[in-house]
Image (cartoon, helix red, strand yellow):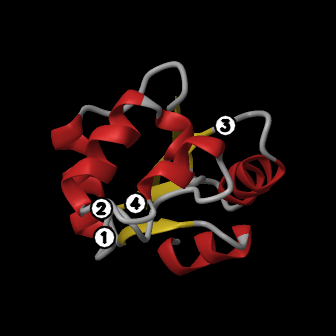
Amino acid sequence: MKATIYHNPRCSKSRAALALLTEAGADVHIIEYLKTPPTRDALVALLDRAHLTPRDALRTTEPEAKALKQADDAHILDAMVQHPILIERPIVETAKGVLIARPPERVHELL
């Protein structure tokens, strides 16, 4: 099975999700999204496939998120593209779907 993970190697949840995918034998494509952020269109497509709104995928614990409390989806998306740290992690994609793997064990839903 092929899987893609939007990964931050400094995040314990992201590392745990990657380990679960690897242990399950998945062929994992790792995208370090802080180094290679998704385009706005790619992010929209990913969130659509996950049935998430931009607000659902917003990492609210980041300082940059405070300015987005009243923002609409378009502004949140723009902020995520400009500051990819605002994208909740890890996002995992397989042929079965897309989800935010929090907790990391959620990856089993896609295997």
Q: Which mark is residue 47?
A: 2
Labels 4, 2: front one: 2
Labels 1, 3: front one: 1
Find disc 1 in the rendering and name its residue.
53
- The image position of residue 34, as x and y in percent, is 54, 27
Q: Along the polypeptide, which appears first: circle 2 or circle 1?
A: 2
Residue 95 shown left or right of residue 63 in the figure = left
Q: Which mark is residue 111?
A: none
- The image position of residue 42, as x and y in percent, is 22, 42
Find disc 4 in the rendering and name its residue.
94
**Mark 2 to mark 3: distance in Å?**
18 Å
Q: Along the polypeptide, which appears first: circle 1 or circle 3?
A: 3
Q: Which mark is residue 8?
A: 3
Q: Label 4 amino acid?
A: Thr
**Mark 1 to mark 3: distance in Å?**
21 Å
Q: Label 2 amino acid?
A: Leu
Say above or below: 83 vs 51. above
Classify mark 3: helix, strand or loop: loop
Q: Label 1 amino acid?
A: Thr
Can residue 5 be seen here? no
